[in-house]
Amino acid sequence: MAGNTGTDAVILVGGQGTRLRPLTLSAPKPMLPTAGLPFLTHLLARIAEAGITHVVLGTSFKAEVFEEHFGDGSELGLELEYVTETEPLGTGGGIRNVLPKLRADNVMVFNGDVLGGTDLGAILDTHEKTLADVTLHLVRVSDPRAFGCVPTDEDGRVTAFLEKTQDPPTDQINAGCYVFRREYIEKIPTGRPVSVEREVFPALLAEGARVQGHVDASYWRDMGTPEDFVRGSADLVRGIAPSPALPGQRGESLVHPGAGVAPGALLIGGTVVGRGAEIGAGARLDGAVIFDGAVVEAGATVERSIIGFGARIGPRALVRDGVIGDGAVVGARCELLRGARVWPGVEIPDGGIRFSTDV
C-alpha cells in the first residue's frame, strides 16, 4: 500500500437520490445496501487501499445517517470528518464548503454515487507527474451521449468540457473523480450554488490552468437509476466490479448468514439476500437485490429488481425491473413489470395487478 498521506479525500454525498425513489425516502443513496454493504463502504475501502487516510464527507440529505454508521472511520482505518450543507450548493459549492476541514495540498474529490474500479494511486501519479492544477479521471464508455464529454490533447491535457451531445467527438467522459491543488478549491466562490462541471472547470481552462486527464477503461457505473443500481450490485457479487470491501468468494449470489433460503429456490445473476430475509421454496431470483428482512414467498419470481426493507412478495408473484418500497406487500400472483415502483407500506391484494389475462 502506497502512502498518500499528502492527499485528503472528499466525498460528495448530499444528493437526494430522487431517481431511486421510493428507496431513498428512508435512506440516502450512498447508504443503500449494495452487495450486502452500504454503497459508500466500497468507495471508502478503495480510498483506504490507496493509502489516503483523511476523508471528509460533504453531506446534506439525511446527513446524520452517515456519522451514525461510519463514526470516526477507525474501523476502516480512516479518519472521517463530516460537513453538512444547510442549503444545496451544487458540486463546486459542496467542494468549497468542506475547505475548512482540509489539511493536505492535494485533494481527491469523489462523486458519492459512482461505482468504480480504477487505480486511485495511478490518478494521483498522473497529477504529480504532469504538475497539474486539477486532474480529472476520464473513463472511456461505449455510448458517451448520455454524459459530459471531455476531449484531451496528445499530452493528455483537457481541451474542453462538452455537455451531453448527440454526436460526441470523444468517448471520454467525466467519471466524477478529481484531484485539485488546494489553492484551486480556495478560488471557488462561496455562499452560492456552483457547478464544478459547468462553471469551475470551464473557468480553469479559460484562465490557462493545467487541467490534466487521466484516461482509462476501468470498471465504472453511475448508480443513480434502479437499473444501474441492480447491475452494479450484481457486478460486485460476481466479481466483475472490484471492491476491497468484499474479500473472498465471488459467484452467482451473496446470501447473508442470517437469511433463510428454502430448498429448491434458485438464486442467480448476482442476487443479494440481506440479513433476516426469507426466500421460499421454488422462488426464482435473478439479479435481485433483497434488502434486510424482506420475504419472497414460494414460487415467486424477482428479476433485476430491488425489494426494500421488510417488504413481502406473495406466492407466484412476478416482479421484473421494479422497485418495491420498504414494508410494501405485493399479493400472490401479481405481475409488476417495466419500471414499476411500489411506495413504502402499500399493499397490493392477491392478483390485484396483472399484465396478462389469466389469473
Image (spheres, rainbow, N blue to C red):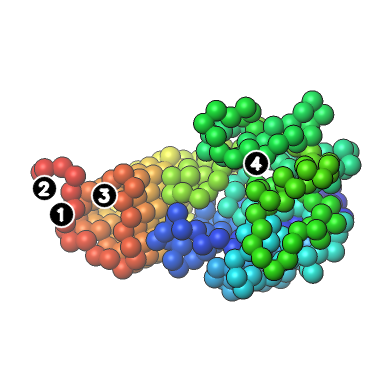
Q: Amino acid at mark 1?
A: Gly
Image quadrant of residue 83? bottom right
Secondary structure at numbered mark 3: strand
Mark 4 / mark 1, whichever is N-terminal: 4
Kindly tell me whether residue 274 is visible in this rendering: no
Mark 4 to mark 2 CA distance (whole Å): 48 Å
Secondary structure at numbered mark 1: loop
From the viewer's perspective, is the residue at label 4 or at label 1 nearer?
4
Residue under circle 4? 174
Residue under circle 1? 351
Q: Nearer the viewer, residue 162 or 99?
A: 162
Q: Amino acid at mark 3?
A: Leu
Q: Residue at x 69, y 32 (%)?
A: 151
Q: Amino acid at mark 2?
A: Val
Q: Nearer the viewer, residue 356 or 108?
A: 108
Residue 297 left/right relative to 137: left
The circle on residue 359 is 2
Q: Residue at x 69, y 57 (%)?
A: 92
